[in-house]
Amino acid sequence: MSRDELRQPLRKRSLKERLWARRPSAFALTAGSLAALFVVGGIWISRIPHPFAGEPVVVAVIPPPQELQTSSTTSPEDGAKSASDAAEAPEDIIDSNAGIAESSNEPAEKPAYMKEAAIFTAPNRPLKPAPIAAVKEDGAEGPLPRISDRGKKPFDVYSQVTPLAVSTSERPKITIILGGMGLNAKLTAKAIKELPGDITLGFAPYGENLQAQVNKARARGHEILLQVPMEPVGYPGNNPGPNTLLSSVEPEKNIESLRWHMSRFAGYSGITNYMGARLLVSEAALKPVMKEIKKRGLVYLEDATVNLTLSPRIVQDVRVPMQRASMVIDSEATAPAIADMLEKLEKEAIANGFAIGTGSGLEVTIDTVAEWAKSLQEKGILLVPVSATYRGRPS
């Protein structure tokens, strides 16, 4: 109690005095400051991207195997016999095949990339369910992709994060895209479950319950591409489906059709063609489509089914990131033929550093690719999602 209160105990205290009397203790102030610091720090940390969070990556140096001669591999009798034979052999007799036999037993020199440390990554690294609000636009038919207010593109938001150890490795890299997903729920579920997450899946816009299937695929780590039907030679007798992009209509009609396809589901990082031999040679029809793809923050992948195409030149003008597959792995849908194409893909990757192959979601393709993927580790070849082909590479 202050001195003034002793003299005038009944005096009414001022507001300032009452607030001062109720001031928090030093302990309470410290505790509150620490709590605020933890809250602000937690929010700040949660907004920082962590490329490798939840993605265990192990890099291990594995020395080459060496043959060791021990008492268990060479018997005393053999050793003694060899020594006596060597002693009895005349010095002036030379075996002309000795050098050949010796050289044939030497292992072939391993490529430089095989001497790198082995890289092990989690086979299924989950991706967030779609749509993600920051890159979603509400369209008349459904959600459309858009570039966020902060400049984030759907390609960035919906892509898998490739570990730095993988992206900087000199090992050959292969990307596989299997399309036709969503049309057959059973085969789509099989592909999602049995294929490693770094296999990219292309979803057609005509299936049922597409968003749920896409999110199941993303939960297993699969990147998603949207397959857009484009006019083939022989249309309409050869018809990819409703709202096919056509070379003979006004650009606005194709943009309307493209947006219908885009609104069927969310979660894809890019567009890939389905057919399109007629549309892809029409600059007047194709250029507005590429501009819309760029506007939406997406990339474009072209499969190897169309030989004559204007896409490479048009994307240079529009500045859309583009990659082109070099082969279709299941044009002949048998296990031996698919295995042969995968072997060719390996050779291309070894020669060029990178190779992209496309295929369909057929049961034989899924089974063959799943089995083939198990052999890549010992071959020193890396399997990467399609987004890895666009990062650090020319469009």
Image (cartoon, rainbow, N blue to C red):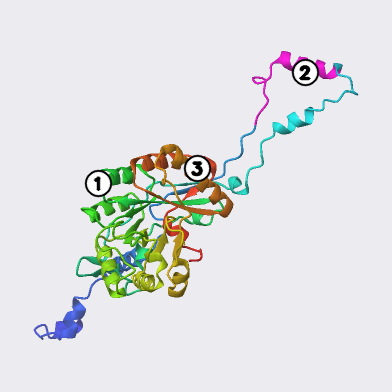
Q: Which dot, 3 or 1, sits closer to the camera?
A: 1
Disc 1/disc 2 C-alpha distance (Å): 68 Å
Instruction: Assign a secondary structure to mark 3.
Output: helix
Residue 344's disc is none
In the displayed structure, 190 sits above or below 140; it is: above
Outermost residue on the left side: it is: 10
Left or right: where does residue 28 sit relative to residue 234?
Answer: left
Counting from the top left corner in percent of width and height, residue 355 is at: 50, 53
Residue at 62% across, 46% down: 111
Circle 1 residue: 185
Counting from the top left corner in percent of width and height, residue 281 is at: 42, 67
Circle 3 residue: 377
Mark 2: few, some, or many residues within 10 Å (few <14, many ≥20)? few
Cβ atoms at labels 3 and 1 below 8 Å apart: no
Left or right: where does residue 67 sit relative to residue 388?
Answer: right
- Image quarter for residue 285? bottom left
Instruction: Assign a secondary structure to mark 2.
Output: helix
Mark 1: few, some, or many residues within 10 Å (few <14, many ≥20)? some
Cβ atoms at labels 1 and 2 below 8 Å apart: no
Mark 3: few, some, or many residues within 10 Å (few <14, many ≥20)? few
Magenta segment range? Answer: 67-87
Q: Quadrant of the N terminus?
A: bottom left
Residue 82's disc is 2
Disc 3/disc 2 C-alpha distance (Å): 41 Å
